[in-house]
Each structure stands twice: as C-alpha cells, then as structure tokens.
Image: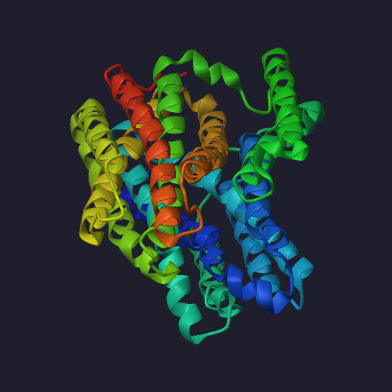
Amino acid sequence: MGEIKRLPILISLMIGAFFSILNETLLNIAFPQLMIELNVSASTLQWLATGYMLVVGVLVPASGLLVQLFTTRQMFLGAMILFTAGTLVCGIAPHFSILLVGRLLQAAGTGLMLPVLMNTILVLYPPDKRGAAMGSIGLVIMFAPAIGPTLSGLILESLQWRWLFYLVLPFAVFSIVFAAIYLKNVSETKKIKVDVLSLILSTIGFGAVVYGFSSSGEGHGGWSNPLVYGTVSIGIIALVLFVFRQLRVPEPLMDLRAFQYPMFTLTTILLIIMMMTLFSTMSLLPFLFQGALGLTVFASGLLMLPGSLLNGLISPLTGKLFDKFGPRALVIPGAAFLVVIMWFFTQVTVETSRMTFLLLHICLMVAISMIMMPTQTNGLNQLPPRFYPHGTAILNTLQQVSGAIGVAFFIGVMSSGQRAFLAKSPNPTAPDQMAGAMVAGVHNAFLIGFGFSVVAFLISFFIKRTQAPKV
C-alpha cells in the first residue's frame, strides 16, 4: 500500500484518538467545582473516573473479536460516534447521573478506539516501517493525557466546566467527517463464532479487577473495605476461568497462544512494569507537589507538562531509531536511565527545588519513551498476522489493568508510609509534620518503583529484534 494511501488513514486515526484519549485526564481537575455544582460527594463523583476506566477495561478484551467482525471504517466511525454522543450528553447534563451516562459513552468510544488504532498500524505498515508509525501513535497516546490537566486548568480559569466538553465537540465531529472521507478499510472481516461464556468471564474478570484496584486507591476505604478485596477476588477467579476457557475453545475471544512467541511475552511483562511506573509517578507527584510543596493544582500541572510533552514529541523519533537500529539500542540505555532517575526520586525532600523536579520528570519521560513504543512494536512484530487483533487486545487490556493496579498499589504504599511517620511524630497535625509525612510516604513508594526499574533493566538484556513470520 503506497504512502499516499497510508497517510490520510493514519491522520484520521490520530485525530480521533487524540480527542478521545485527551478526555481521560481532562475532567479530573474540575472535580472540586463539580462537587459544589452537582451537589455530590467526592466518593460519588469519583465514579466519573472509575466508571471510565471500568468501561475501557471491559471493552478492550472484546476488541480482538470486534476487529475481526467489523471493518476498520465501521469500528472507527462507530467508536467516534459513541464518543461524540457521550461528549454532547456530558455538555448538556442537568445532573450527575446524566453526566455519568455521557462519560460512560465516551469511555466506550475510547475503549474501541485504541485496539483499532494499533491493529490498523500492524496491517498497514510492513515490520521495517512500523516503528515510525507506532511512534506517531505514541505521540498521541502520551501527548493527549499530558496536556489534559493543564488545558482544563486554563479553560476552568475563565469558563464553566461544561466548556471542557463543548470545546471538544467540534473536533470530534470533524474527526468523523474526515474519517468518512479518507479512512479506508485495511482489514478483512471474518465470520467467527462468538463464545458467550468467554465474553461474560472477560467482562466480570477485567471489570472487577479494574474496579477493585481503582476503588482501593481512590478513597473508598482501601483494602479495609470488604467490597474492594471481595471484588478483586471475584475478578481474579473469573480471569483464571477465562484463561482456561481460552485454551479450550477453537475460536477464543483473546487468543492466549500469542504468548508462545517469547519476545511478545517479554514485551508484555516489560509493558506492565512500565505502565505501573508511569501511572504511579503521574499520581504520586501531584500529591508531593500539593501536599508537601504547597503548589496549586494548576501549578502542579505546569510543572509536569514539559516532561509529558517531550515524551510525546520524542515518540516518533524513537520509532524511527527503532526501525534503523532495532530495540536493544533504545531499550537497554532507556532502562539504565530509568534506574538512575528512580534512584534520584528516592532522594527528594521538601527542600528539593522545583527545577530539580522539572528536570527529573523530563528525564523520566524521556526514559519511558525510549522503552515503551520500541518494545511494544518489537513484541507485536513477532506475531503472525492472524494474531494481530489478539496481540493488540492483550497489550491494551494489560495497560489498563496494570495502570489501575499501579496507582492503587503505590498510593497504598504512600499512605502507609505517611501513617507510620505521623505515628512517631509528637505533633502529627503540625504543617511541617504533615509535609514530612507526605515526603516519607512518597519515598517508600519511589523505593519500590526503583525496584521495578531494576527488574525492567534486567529484562531489557533479553530483548532481541524480531522477524515477522508470514503465517
């Protein structure tokens, strides 16, 4: 397929993906305003974030099936129409329940969008050019959530929260029109038998795990709440049954035989570690900035913006370098760099300057960009074409699940570190003691993050350039 045909398709996908992924982080900064205006509690309002993750976590596993049942155009346009409808509903929502419905519609669109994006790249580009294409996708995936908090902070300074949706709406409509004109079908549909039991087990398993871990880290009583550990236990049991089911049925919902390819398996492990590190850092740093350094939400967003923007901008470059030099030239130095940065994060104090935090965050994002997309592209390259939908579904699902687990786990470690510090303090309510407790908690969390980075560094030595099989 010629370059002229590829480019409009890639642009169509990137426009839609940018605005659907942007919405994952666009609303969170408006929560205090929404609590007052909609007259709901923080725990109720948190459903706008938890519900979003839940729908994406449930839909992505089924995407391997949907990508085979529907054409590229049908999947993309369906996802964007769902997202646009959800955006409109959110904008005009008179009360919380309608806002939640709109948010879940947006999530359904996003959940269908990500697998279409990656699967289309695999079909559209030969292995020797996939790195650059996946790097372009990495730009969108990293850039959109990075500017979300800062962009929403700017909007909310002068406009009402509804404008967070009104301003996205015309771009979403433009994406639908652009895709309707330029997006071509790149994959063939198949008539496959849908295994209903697999679908049920997948929905219960991934949904319960994502919900349970998200809830444990979002002020629902943590693991002391029986609902949290009960939900996670049910999810794990359902997932075990789901795995056994996939290995027995002739046409699995998510073909786990993709794990017989060693580089794909290593990619999956490395990606889980990286997503936990990324999500946890993005969650821990705002706590540190606001709780210990006394920065505003907007100032925190600005401090983290340069690193996140650079991560997105470097992704296309790392993709091109991957095509030229292979994964080892990027992943091994990137993992070594990550170990050094995570060690520096364990040394921060209340006296650490904002410039130091800015530089550390920039370095962290550069290291992650050197690892994430090259590893992901290399792992998917080893799969035969029949495994493309399943490989992308597996990686996208585990990104959602590991992200939810990472945030909950690291915030739990931070909280226990805070409690231990305050228990020894003679005056636990004093501001300096509260700030000290926050730093102590974050130190503990970053220490474990440092351990994860060492594991990632060791795994990086086993990464080898893959050759795509023809079958």
Image quarter for residue 466? top left
Is residue 11 visible from the viewing direction of this image?
A: no
Q: Quadrant of the N terminus?
A: top left
Q: For residue 251, which quarter of the picture?
A: top right
Q: Residue at x 43, y 61 (%)?
A: 431
Q: Residue at x 68, y 53 (%)?
A: 51
The vertical placement of 219 against 414, above or below, is: below
| Left or right: 199 in relation to 16 | right
Query: Does 116 appear above or below 374?
Result: below
**Whether residue 451 is situated above or below residue 308 in the rendered picture:** above
x and y, in percent, of residue 10 in the image: 41, 53
Give 462 or 356, whichever is nearer the viewer. Answer: 356
Residue 284 visible from this viewpoint:
yes
Q: Position of residue 179 (x, y in %)?
A: 52, 62
Q: In percent of the image, x 53 and y 35: which residue is there?
A: 402
Lateral position of residue 368 relative to residue 239, left or right: left
Residue drawn at x 28%, y 33% is: 128
